[in-house]
Image: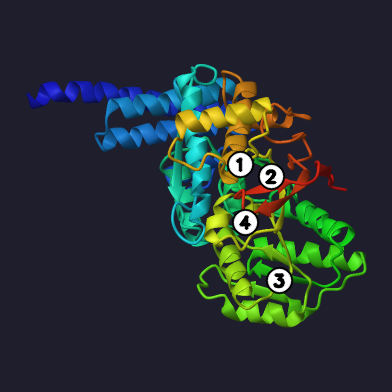
Amino acid sequence: MKQQGTRPMRWFATFIFGLLVAGMLAACGDSTATTAPATTAATTAAAATTAAGAAATTAAAAVATTAVGAATTAAAAGAATTAAAAASTGGNATGVTDTEITLGGWGPQSGPAAAYGIIDRTIDAYFKKVNADGGVNGRKIKFIFQDDAYNPATTATVVKKLVEQDKVFAFVGGLGTAHNLGVMDYLVQNGVPHIAPATGSTAISTPFKKPIFALQTNYTTEGALLTRYAIDSLSSKKIAIFYQDDPFGKEGLDVISKTAEAKGVKIADSAKVSYQTTDKDFSSQALKLQQTGADTLFFWSVPGPTAALMKEIDKIGYKPTLIMSAVNNDSSLFSLSDNTVDKAWTASWLPDVADPDNKDAKVMAFRDFMAKNLPNEKQDSGFAVSGYAEAQLAVEALKRAGKDLTREKLIVAMESIQSWNDSMAYNVSYSGTSRQGQNAVYFMQADAKQKRFIKKSDFLELKPQ
């Protein structure tokens, strides 16, 4: 019995050796191939973004290792299929099989920013709807998203897992400024595309990073437009800022300060009050802000701290004009703040789905999607709309990339998107030199009686210089 069992194994070993030889020959025959560093097998596979031969060699080595470890032949066949796809298309097809595309994401399903968790749940539901409708170019989308609890250190861990263990083809909608900045170099080095990171950080698109495509209007554009609106239309004379002490908050602080000063309104250092994401008590920040005497208070903060500070300043009788980043533009803020968000101003880069009079076809399609696919979620969630828009962009790019899917072809497909308005996003454009998709916002004001934000302006666009 033992001797009979060794004959298939000898045949399989011969088959594996053949794959190794073929891979090495392919590598030698490709003048553009590069040698990947000898780290883990998974990291090597992800790093081979332009070397078809190296990708085939790495995949074959992975199969050989599997054989030594007596892994299943199905797993070996899957790796061989991916390697063959990469070799035949001249690119990196990690995460792609004949029937499936594996995409990844991360965001807080728990922790201080858990309100954003609906973004990934919406992306997941959208992909499942696409799969039910037949998928993309004959393939179904598998979306794996991880909870990082809004902790950048956790983000780095889950992203590495998704790349090296789950072998994702690309990322969609990974959330957070510090979180994205912490993993961006890793994704670039490994050639892993990231479509529509859920942040408005300007650092996502500037400087240029080939596999990273920003969608959301960036914070510099949003902050400049909000500050101009405050001074020109809301008669703001003295401004204070409550900001998160990280790259997200500091970008808002910087652009608001510079824009205000350019319009003759200097913001005192004492009126720049920060917080940490771990803070629970905001009473000291409320007192500091009240003491500034500012008639306008900007919030460059996430929903939990925003709502907590609003309740604190209301408690002590401080009543400035409130202006918030679009990161707070969600109906959940009314309950989080005990309605103290009333009359606050904010920006939006996506359509108003909470307006019952909005009968736009895209909005109606979103409402139908939510009712059918996410019936237990907030149906008018601004965060859900952002996840929906991010998923729409990813599907459009996958369609344009074609049947012979590689990471390189996905990037080319993204660059072909010009003045695109077939999704919830507005006038989205990319090119071989630009990675900022949308550059416009409009303004809204909170109405506590209706528990929603009311649109007060049309889109204003501010394209990068």
- Decide which of tag 1 and tag 2 comes sooner along the chain: 2
Binning the other alpha carbons within 10 Å of mark 2 as few (below 14), some (14 to 19) or many (20 upward) gives many
Please state which amino acid type lies under the numbered disc 4. Thr
- Quick one: SS at disc 2? loop
Q: Mark 1 or mark 3, which is nearer to you?
A: 3
Residue receiving disc 3: 319
- Residue 344 location, quadrant: bottom right
- Decide which of tag 1 and tag 3 comes sooner along the chain: 3
Please state which amino acid type lies under the numbered disc 2. Gln
- Decide which of tag 4 and tag 2 comes sooner along the chain: 4
**Label placed on residue 216:** 2
Q: Is residue 6 above or below residue 157?
A: above
- From mark 2 to mark 3, how far is it between C-alphas? 31 Å
Please state which amino acid type lies under the numbered disc 1. Ser
Residue at the spot x=62%, y=40% of the render? Answer: 354
- Decide which of tag 3 and tag 4 comes sooner along the chain: 4
**Label placed on residue 177:** 4
Is residue 229 rendered to the left or right of residue 339?
right
Q: Mark 4 or mark 2, which is nearer to you?
A: 2
Does residue 221 appear in this view? yes
- From mark 4 to mark 2, how far is it between C-alphas? 12 Å
Please state which amino acid type lies under the numbered disc 3. Lys
Work out whether residue 17 or residue 394 is closer to the camera in this orientation and state it.
394
Residue at the spot x=61%, y=37% of the render? Answer: 390
Residue receiving disc 1: 386
**Mark 1 in CB contact with mark 2 (< 8 angstroms):** yes
